[in-house]
Image (cartoon, grey):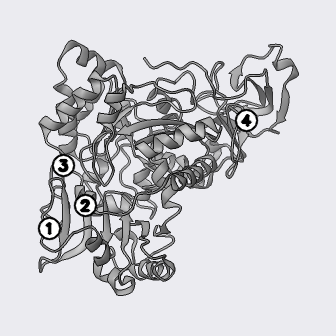
Amino acid sequence: MLPATPTSAGPHDGHALEFRNARLFTGEGFTEPSSLHVVDGIITEPGSAAAGRAEVVDLDGRYLMPGFIESHAHPGMLGISLMELDLRPAAAPSVQAIVAAVDGAVRTAAPGEWVRGSGWEETFLAEGRGPTREDLDAVSGDVPVVLTRTCRHMLVANTAALRASGIDEDVADPPGGRFVRDEAGRMTGLVQEKAMDHIAAPAYADEDWDEAFSRAQDAFISWGVTTAHDMSTLAPHLRYYSRAGQAGQLRIRFRPWLWALSQAGMEGVLDHALGAGIASSLGDDRMRIQGMKFMLDGSVGGRTAAVSCAFEGTEDTGLLYIEDETLLHQLRRAVRGGLRLAVHGIGERALDQALGALGALDTPEEREFLTTMRNRIEHCALPLPAHLDALAEWNLIASSSVAFVYHLGDSYLRVLGPERVKRAYPHRSFLDHGIVAPGNSDAPVVNGNPWEGIYAATTRTTSSGVVLDREQNITLAEAIRAYTRDAAYGSFEEDRLGTLTSGAHADLQVLDRDPFALEPTDLLTLAPVAVYSAGTRVDPADTRIDG
């Protein structure tokens, strides 16, 4: 079991707070106005000597609940996306608008600079398609341009970017990836999955990552998120955590999962971690390493998830990244090194592969690790009954990207069809099987406000108002738990995070409305009026907290 003892999360000088006239979250609703006591960043019972001289914060009847835990996000990518061209539908609703944004960036690009953007999704573009190499070439000239789809599993590159990467029309598709071609056999510029490894965009510098993570923390705080699991931690990210931790610039808690293998244009660190003896639980309460992340397939909306039946209107069943034997070998290496497992599996074939490899961990030590270390299946989008049974039997966590139902549900409906989409992110089935299923956004894939995921889990309704089904709905209390206690369970911290019980970290958010008294659509506009990390108030654009 991972340790959860307090270390450097907050002040240690007897600093005390008393939140008065606060309606406290019980797990099922809120109390009448009451008090909550905090000493040295830890929630405590009233009556201690320090509590007697506490600083008083009068909430005047507002609603006090635990900070949210984002169980699957990419903070570095999120911050970088806020520094690139914003191509999300709200900012660029058409291919024409995307091309105009690229045109403006090309005109101001420095010599040798690449133009990068992210967030486009063809379902929501006016033309009903994504941008192409030809679209970009019309305005980019010799400036390399790379635009990443919202799923992060594919990108579109212009001719200059392909040329700079040494890619020509004769390039072969790598295993687990594609250079998409048109009917005439010419590359469209769309580069999928492991083919992205061949795009030679310059690496970001340390100062870029510093700015990216600062912006990511601003975003998380604005959403009431006080802990974030980083599901693609690379070597530059670990260097950032070290620098920021020493400088007191980690305003929220981070739980990194190291990116295991070189995939999707990112260099894996499994070999380095094993060589250095890095294992799960290394770190402190502000930043603690969780384990290794392995990716098996792509995305539903991009039609690269490894599904069992072809996507609607196609003969395509998606892509698997690695062979079964290779996956089992790498999982075994991680387990023997004491690193917990998080395996990305979206489509049914990917879940087959993930659970098949996990089931092949057959030594007594491996079986104990499998069933006791709260290993995870990431996304777990389309599980079948046999998958649910295995998840329950082996105490695996289904880290569910249920926020996709709201943000990407229309895309899922288009490519899966009305019957198959009903079982996407099946939270009622997870609960009925006793499977712990924390919710997440996969930010920056979709917006990271947990209330949007909570809305999706309770209504199964897309952003356009389409109800995908009514069988997988869960209650509001269950959905909030998915972003608090259930998410804390994923890091062995359910007694320390996501709760207002004595002994827990005072990671808190204050609301001015009771979510249980709102219409479901009103949940989408909820935001905290104050956020506390280890009992210290944090706000977007803060530069540090104590500890």
In primary-sequence order, the first of circles 1 and 3 is: 1
Element at label 3: loop
Residue at 25% across / 60% down in the picture? Answer: 198
Element at label 4: strand
Q: How far apart are marks 2 and 4 (CA)?
A: 45 Å
> Is the residue under label 1 in contact with that under label 2 (CB below 8 Å)?
yes
Residue 185, quarter of the rendered image: bottom left
Question: Outermost residue, bottom direction?
Answer: 138
Q: Mark 2 points at which residue?
A: 198
- Amino acid type, residue under disc 2 in the picture: His
Question: Is residue 159 something that shows in the picture?
Answer: yes
Q: From what the image shows, is residue 547 above or below residue 315? A: above
Residue at 85% across / 29% down in the picture? Answer: 55
Q: Distance between the residues labelled 1 and 3?
A: 20 Å
Element at label 2: helix
Q: From what the image shows, is residue 312 above or below residue 157? A: above
Q: Name the residue under label 4.
A: 536
- Name the mark nearer the viewer: 2 or 3: 2
- Amino acid type, residue under disc 3 in the picture: Leu
In primary-sequence order, the first of circles 4 and 1 is: 1
- Amino acid type, residue under disc 1 in the picture: Val
Q: From what the image shows, is residue 202 above or below residue 56? A: below
